[in-house]
Image (cartoon, rainbow, N blue to C red):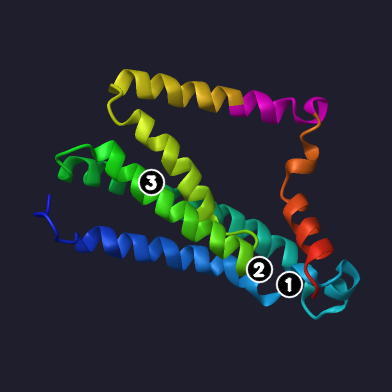
Amino acid sequence: MASKGERIDGLDALRGFAIFGILLINIQVFSGWGFVSADTRQALTWSEWDEPIATWLDILVRAKFYSLFSLLFGYSFMMLAQRVQQSPVRYHLRRMLGLLVIGTAHSLFLSPWDILMLYGVMGLFLGAFLNVRAPTLAACGVALLVVTGVALWFEPQLGLADLGSGLPLRLLQDNVPA
């Protein structure tokens, strides 16, 4: 563990690697590709490669880099909690409220799907688990996986089909001029 105020180069490099992978996915969003109609996409050269490339990007990039960045977010929380001697939860809550304010402002004024706001909200819940023992954390993780699995299994019966990846794209297309 580095001394107080020092950065850990390996973690920073890993964080930069994760952000680069996330950038690979977001380039498609930034380019406006989501606003191009399906007919126009099909008329383009090499359009038959769109679906396989999207599938491989999902498998090799999206799931890996978002997970890695989220893991580093939690690990950094634990490292900060060990460094801060007095009230690490209060310190973390202040940081997450700041992140939430910045994310909300960014979401309102620049990009409607800003991840900082989500990290701020999820980070607020993270402080509640700081002093929880490992078996309880494992049980909470398994319970969350089971609830998620059941919700996905019964997605059509629960009416959750509109919450899939198509909803954000439709909202963007309906509300943001191309």
Kind of residue at badge 3: Leu
Q: Which residue has dot 3 on it?
A: 71
Question: Is 163 drawn above or below residue 145 in the view shown?
Answer: below
Q: Position of residue 35 (x, y in %)?
A: 79, 70
- Can residue 111 be seen here? The reply is no
Residue 77 shown in magenta: no
Q: CA distance from mark 2 to mark 1?
A: 6 Å
Horizontal placement of 3 versus 51: left or right?
left
Instruction: Give the number of the disc on residue 33.
Output: 1
Give the Cα separation between the discs numbered 1 and 3: 29 Å
Q: Position of residue 12 (x, y in %)?
A: 28, 63
- Nearest to N terminus: mark 1 or mark 3: 1
Quick one: SS at disc 1?
Answer: helix
Spot occupied by residue 162 in the image (x, y as percentages of width and height):
80, 42
User: What is the distance, in whole Å, between disc 2 and disc 3 at their CAs?
Assistant: 24 Å
Residue at image point 67% right, 61% down: 54
Instruction: Tell me whether circle 2 and circle 1 mark residues in contact (CB < 8 Å).
Output: yes
Q: Is residue 120 visible?
A: yes
Relative placement, left or right, of 133 versus 86 is: right
Going by the image, does 152 lie left or right of 42?
left
Q: Residue at coordinates 73% horizontally, 54% vertically from top-left?
A: 168
Name the mark on residue 29: 2
Residue under the image location 78 percent in, 26 percent down: 158
**Residue interval drawn in magenta:** 148-158
Residue 161, placed above or below residue 167: above
Which residue is at the front of the view, 2 or 62? 2
- Name the amino acid, label 2: Val
**Residue flagged by tag 1: what amino acid is it?**
Trp
Q: Is disc 3 surrounded by few (<14), some (14 to 19) or many (20+) residues within 10 Å?
A: few
